[in-house]
Amino acid sequence: MINKILIANRGEIAARVIRTCKKLNIPSVAIYSDADKQAPYVKMADESYGVGGTRVHESYLNMDRIIEIAKEAGADAIHPGYGLLSENPEFAERCEQEGLTFIGPSPSSIAKMGSKIEARKTMKEAGVPVIPGTEAPVSSVDEAIQVANEIGYPVMLKASAGGGGIGMQVVHDNDELQKAYESNSRRAQNFFGDGTMYLEKKIENAHHVEIQILADHHGHVVHLFERECSIQRRHQKVIEEAPSPLLTDDTREKMGEAAKKAAKAIHYSNAGTIEFLVDEEQNFYFLEMNTRLQVEHPVTEEITGIDLVEQQIKIAAGEKLTIRQDQLKINGHAIEVRVYAEDPNTFFPSPGTITSLTLPEGDQIRHEIGVEEGYTVTPFYDPMIAKLIVTGQTRSETIQHLEEALNQYQVEGIKTNLPFIQKVVQTEAFKKGFTRTSFVEDYLMQSK
Amino acid sequence: MKQVVANMAGSVWKIVANEGDQVSKGDDIVILESMKMEIPISAEEDGTITSLKVKEGDFVNEGDVIAELE
């Protein structure tokens, strides 16, 4: 039983979690930094507390203060949202010690999937296909060249300590690898204090496809099909959809089973996502596991009719899953686009005040939004300000609804990526489902 | 004289070059930070930095002058 939930997050995802709390009649507690006092989600919650500071390390990553607020407010559970503290095993552990229910998996599941190399090893042992690559970080050029020749070019070179793109590069031969290793390893050393690198075979013509799972504390695991999230910029997702235009029914079934096997291997509980790369011959390879709710979870909710936040809360409270795999069906199609406060050509951030906001409306339209007219988008947090989710019976019908919705969507006062999204959606390639992860370079870079 | 301007709004995360420094085209002068992204601002031509208009922690808007080169 959970009686009161503190949401250790901000923006659209805080608003999303509060909505389900209201549906379940569970009082909600919001926290806000000095920069977020005026944010819409703060007013939506039943109670709200200032966490102090502006930058994330002094506000939304301040574990001591967040736990103090939870106790002061009488909350007995914490929903971490995504990002911030959601995949921090230390925070999950602190919650446990303080007698608070962490709405997510156990600290040990988070830790196991947190290290890329550790996660690969676990998945390989569980029989889940992984991308051919290094089992341990390499610390010299010679070692890197030897591994690259074993797995075959092209290879992806990645910094062990890296996250969002820094220190990541595709190389095609020994010469390129030598140069890339030296510069990326130096940068990784400067940025993260760890210059070790690892190598993975570059999967050609890959699509990013991930499987949503739900697992309870009683050993019951179901998968809720896939989301395709191949349209990315700066290695971050921009458009996500379900179902994937690439997968055959047979591949969908196999990937769903592999995801369940992965979850069972680490005794996972709560909502989680297993990310894969899938090539156009339907081969799939484990990429990583996200041990939390995903940004793009609404497309799964739209095609399955299941409220994932509600399931998260029930699982955390110890309830048994009532969903059976054979009852789950894909119903229609859903596409989500992420609205970023950024320049649509350079993708550079664009903070500022929203002077006017016009949102499209309709039966097939859902908004997840963290801003409103007159609100000032600050430079302190992620540039994503809203998500637009559109549904339809078929993919082509959904794209048509999306184009209409985008035509009505107006944000004034700051720059957004909406013109970029419109360009993507209008291409023949997108309409046909030719959505490789290289889509933006393949179809949009030359016309910029 | 040539002005170096900010290409996005954000705060000055790091100052990499100082007044009086000789810089070549492409050398970083400051690194801006906004919304979890770090963007280096570099010299568009060779020259000497005659004046640095910002300090670490300052907030700049797109188009603001960061430095002057000669």
Image (tube, coloured by chain):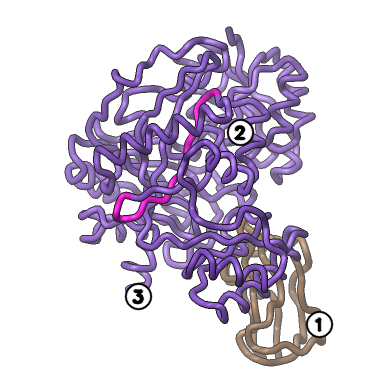
Chain colours: A purple, B brown
Disc 3 versus disc 2: distance between alpha carbons? Answer: 38 Å
From the viewer's side, name the closer residue of A5 and A281.
A281
What residue is pinned by disc 1? B19
Q: Is residue A280 magenta?
A: yes
| Above or below: residue A144 compared with residue A128 | below
A50 in the magenta segment: no
Q: CA distance from mark 3 to mark 1?
A: 38 Å
| Number of on-image labels | 3
| Foreground label between 3 and 1 | 3
Nearer to us: label 1 or label 2: 2
Position of residue A297 in the picture relative to residue A282 (left or right):
right
For the residues bearing labels 1 and 2, Cβ distance under 8 angstroms = no
The N terminus of chain A, quarter of image: top right
Q: Nearer the viewer, residue A42 or A252?
A: A252
Report the magenta residues as a range: A269-282
At label 2, counting other C-alpha atoms closer than 10 Å, the crowd grade (few under 14, some 14-19, many 20 or more) is many
Which residue is found at the position 46% from the left and 58% from the top?
A415
Residue A73 screen position, x and y as percent: 70, 16
Task: Name the subunit of mark 2.
Answer: A
Question: Which label sits in the foreground, 3 or 2?
Answer: 3
Label 3 vs 2, first from the N-terminus = 2
Instruction: Please name the residue that numbered disc 2 is placed on.
Output: A9
For the point 77% across and 86% down, which residue is it? B50
Q: Residue A97, image x and y in percent?
A: 77, 19
Residue at the spot x=50%, y=34% of the render? A262
Helix, strand or loop under label 3 = loop
Residue A133 is left or right of residue A55, and the answer is left
Q: Which residue is mark 3?
A: A446
